[in-house]
Image (cartoon, helix red, strand yellow):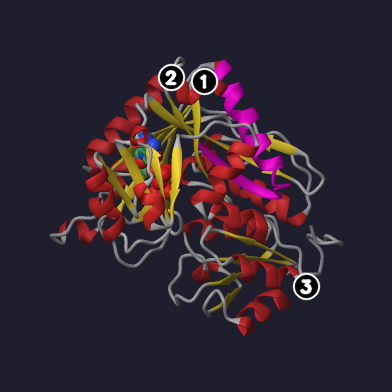
């Protein structure tokens, strides 16, 4: 982290972030809460984080002059999305501490490199093959079908993925994806999915949030539930240990989310980890960690600030069971009803609801506009409130 941390005096210290989306915005809010100024680099004039930061460098992510301006005002710099070019982080790192490093982000932004890293850490992932050439396509092991063809780079929220059953479908899907480098993953019988957020400091100290149980709809996270007993304790322990080894294996500094599939314990793909298969990692806070903003004493964004500023890492404590509901653009009324926005007043009339909106200007289908955290004394209470909120929101 920055060599001399000065907080709360006459000195101002600025933390920088590459990317101005909702994750950057929530990082900036956490940083500002602790007395930091924030700087955002994002080409969009109306980016959620750019609009609430002290500095907004409005250039492309690869713009050398923009990067120099970000570095000039920032004591240390992080990223809020994995597709920021690793070279941009490397340029910033020449003059400022950057966490996570360009090298760690480069692994997370390429599914092939990411899977190779999991294998190297001894954490099982879905059986897969890399497809970069017609020869590799022709040589695909029939055991990988039915499978999911995923672009190696730039995929998110289920985009850049095609489910295929036969070699002919696979060939057609690869052609549809313009024959860019891909991985073919065997389709696994998922029982459910979970994720773990870890925060690792420059000296190797590593803390984690409780294991999150996630429900996806159409490839997009819909609901996260975190409460005592949401996950069998032995499985939670294995997931946390795997996430920590994945982080330490790249000497990771910052907040990292690792997503897992849960299969039947006896499934051969998950043999090494008793039912767990690692799916992917995100080199930043994650949608599935948003509940921590209201249900934990230290949120994933506070952890990001601490790792970036070299502040002490303490194990967060969850003080309330919680359910997070993602709020996609789909629930914004299209007919102008209620001023064209969902009925927040009725939702906020329910005890234990915490509304987070990202300040995005247009509500498109499938676009993440905000999330609703629900907390309460018991998970039963939380579930009843979440169901009622979901009913109101439609
Ligand atoms: P993204 O980067 O878009 O989040 P993921 O690789 O995490 O893409 O896939 C999105 C979702 O699709 C997963 O959360 C899971 O529900 C489903 N999925 C992905 N890969 C597999 C697989 N090999 N077997 C079964 N379901 C899968
Ligand atoms: Mg995913």
Query: Which residue is at the front of the view, 338 or 218?
Result: 218
Q: Circle 3 sits on which residue?
A: 95
Identify the residue at horizontal 46%, vertical 65% (top origin).
48
Can the viewer see residue 62 in this picture? yes
- Quick one: 100 or 274, which is closer to the camera? 274
Q: Quadrant of residue 146 in the image?
A: top left
Q: Which residues are magenta?
A: 234-259
Measured in 3D between alpha carbons, the distance from the residue under mark 1 to the one under mark 2, in whole angstroms, is 6 Å
Q: Is residue 156 visible?
A: no
Residue drawn at (27%, 52%) of the image = 171
Distance of mark 3 from mark 2, alpha carbons? Answer: 48 Å
- Return the x and y of residue 187 as percentages of the image width and height: 34, 34
For disc 1, the marked residue is 271
On screen, residue 33 versus residue 356, left or right, reads: right
Disc ID at residue 168: none
Alpha carbon separation for disc pair 1 and 3:
45 Å
- Check if mark 1's residue and mark 2's residue have beta carbons within 8 Å: yes
In this view, 37 is above or below 22: below
Pointer 2 residue: 267
Quarter that holds the C terminus: top left
Nearer to the camera, 321 or 119: 119
Q: Are marks 3 and 2 in contact (CB under 8 Å)?
A: no
- Mark 1 vs mark 3, foreground winner is 1
Q: Secondary structure at mark 2?
A: loop
Q: Secondary structure at mark 3?
A: loop
Q: Position of residue 74 (x, y in %)?
A: 71, 71
Question: Along the line of sight, which residue is nearer the eye, 324 or 92?
Answer: 92
Furthest toward the right, the residue is: 4
| Mark 2 within 8 Å of ligand 1, using the beta carbon | no
């Amino acid at each position: 982290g920055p060599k001399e941390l000065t907080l709360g005096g006459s000195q101002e210290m600025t933390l920088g972030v590459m990317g101005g989306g909702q994750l950057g915005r929530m990082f900036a809010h956490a940083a500002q809460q602790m007395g930091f100024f924030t700087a955002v680099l994002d080409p969009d004039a109306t980016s959620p984080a750019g609009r609430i930061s002290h500095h907004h460098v409005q250039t492309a992510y690869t713009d050398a002059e923009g990067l120099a301006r970000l570095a000039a005002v920032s004591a240390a710099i992080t990223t809020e999305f994995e597709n920021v070019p690793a070279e941009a982080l490397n340029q910033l790192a020449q003059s400022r501490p950057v966490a996570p490093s360009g090298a760690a982000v480069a692994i997370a932004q390429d599914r092939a490199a990411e899977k190779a890293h999991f294998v190297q850490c001894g954490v099982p992932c879905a059986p897969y093959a890399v497809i970069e050439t017609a020869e590799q396509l022709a040589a695909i092991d029939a055991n990988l079908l039915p499978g999911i063809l995923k672009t190696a780079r730039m995929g998110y929220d289920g985009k850049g993925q095609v489910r295929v059953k036969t070699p002919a479908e696979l060939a057609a899907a690869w052609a549809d994806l313009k024959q860019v480098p891909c991985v073919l993953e065997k389709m696994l019988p998922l029982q459910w999915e979970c994720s773990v957020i870890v925060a690792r400091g420059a000296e190797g100290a590593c803390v984690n949030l409780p294991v999150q149980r996630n429900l996806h709809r159409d490839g997009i996270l819909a609901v996260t539930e975190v409460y005592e007993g949401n996950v069998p304790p032995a499985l939670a322990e294995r997931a946390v240990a795997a996430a920590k080894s994945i982080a330490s294996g790249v000497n990771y500094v910052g907040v990292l989310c690792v997503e897992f599939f849960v299969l039947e314990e006896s499934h051969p793909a998950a043999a090494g980890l008793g039912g767990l298969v690692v799916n992917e990692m995100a080199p930043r806070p994650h949608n599935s960690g948003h509940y921590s903003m209201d249900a934990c004493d230290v949120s994933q964004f506070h952890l990001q600030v601490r790792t970036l500023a070299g502040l002490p890492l303490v194990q967060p404590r969850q003080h309330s069971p919680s359910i997070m509901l993602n709020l996609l653009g789909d629930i914004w009324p299209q007919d102008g009803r209620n001023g064209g926005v969902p009925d927040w007043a009725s939702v906020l009339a329910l005890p234990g609801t915490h509304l987070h909106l990202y300040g995005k200007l247009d509500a498109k289908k499938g676009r993440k506009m905000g999330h609703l955290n629900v907390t309460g004394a018991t998970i039963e209470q939380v579930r009843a409130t979440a169901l009622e909120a979901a009913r109101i929101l439609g």
